Amino acid sequence: MNLLKIRKLKEYQPVSFNEKVIILFKIFIANDWVNCNLNQVLYEPMIVQISFSKDIEDHDLNTNSLKLYSFINHNKVNAILGLKYIRSIEIESDKIYLFEVINAKLHLNLIKRIYLKRIYNLSQRKKSNFFNEFNFDIYKKLVALFSIPKQVWLVSIFNQKENHFPIDLCAIKKNHITIGVRNTNQSINELKIGNTFFLSQPAAEDYKQVYSLGKFICKKEKINTLKINDIILPNIILKYFELSLVSKIEFENQSIYISKIINEKKINQLKKPLYHLHKIWLLNNSKYKII
């Protein structure tokens, strides 16, 4: 895809895939590059959840670098993150690890770097970012984390009233799921430990309806619903998880919610899941399905 076509795309472009998304990460631990799995779980601060392919000692995690490889070509590195270890969390017989992203080095050629700076300057003029504090260093970290397909999810909560909203901060580790949500979200703030809620996988084809459930979108799309065991969910989902809240970790602007899967069900296997990519990574790539 060339620069002229890229200019017409959204900055964080919705995409889908006709094949399984396989992503490669490697983290530098104890003088060796170790395979791991990474998911972003917070924006402010910018925190990622990592799980490892082998047992890791906490004292080896003080300062780390992490390579994000291209989804299209696992021999190519998209970015290198500088990480600061925060803490580990035990979930039953397993552990997850939280790191803050301190910096990012993007592997872009000169033309792409110049174009990326233009995109950043435009977003600054339009004040289109959602961070309380935002600069080019923060933007590079964000672009790095959007160099890999980031899946979009729908959270459904039924407490005082029915509420559905999209998120892209989610990590699945065996039978536990971690999500990150802003502290201004009253419906999830009201959840107590042990309360149940739902996490659904929306279809890429229905991305406009997904967006209409978000806080920052004024235009609302009509969304049909489906009833599952007395629960009403948007009729744009491929599968859902029923979750029980296990713990909550609060930060100034956002909080992490860790839940256990108590049920899951596939609804639609004909459509594809919705992902986002920063459009700079779509340059010279033709394997992504642009929606």
Image (cartoon, rainbow, N blue to C red):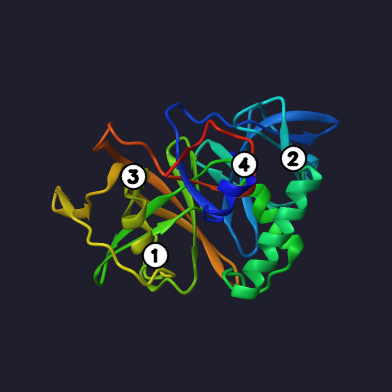
* Residue nearer the viewer, 100 or 215: 215
Residue hosting label 3: 205
Residue 273 x, y percent position in the rendering: 39, 40
In this image, 81 relative to 54: left or right? right
Residue 286 x, y percent position in the rendering: 55, 32
Neighbours of disc 1 within 10 Å: few (<14), some (14-19), many (20+): some
Q: Which SS class for mark 4?
A: loop
Q: Residue at x 50, y 31 (%)?
A: 21
**Residue 214 - label:** 1
In this image, 291 relative to 72: left or right? left
For the residues labelled 1 and 2, the Cα–Cα distance comes to 31 Å
For the residues labelled 2 and 4, the Cα–Cα distance comes to 29 Å
Q: What amino acid is labelled 2 in the image?
A: Leu
Residue hosting label 4: 2
Residue 97 visible, this angle: no
Residue 203 x, y percent position in the rendering: 34, 44
For the residues labelled 3 and 4, the Cα–Cα distance comes to 24 Å
> Going by the picture, which residue comes out furthest to the right?
31
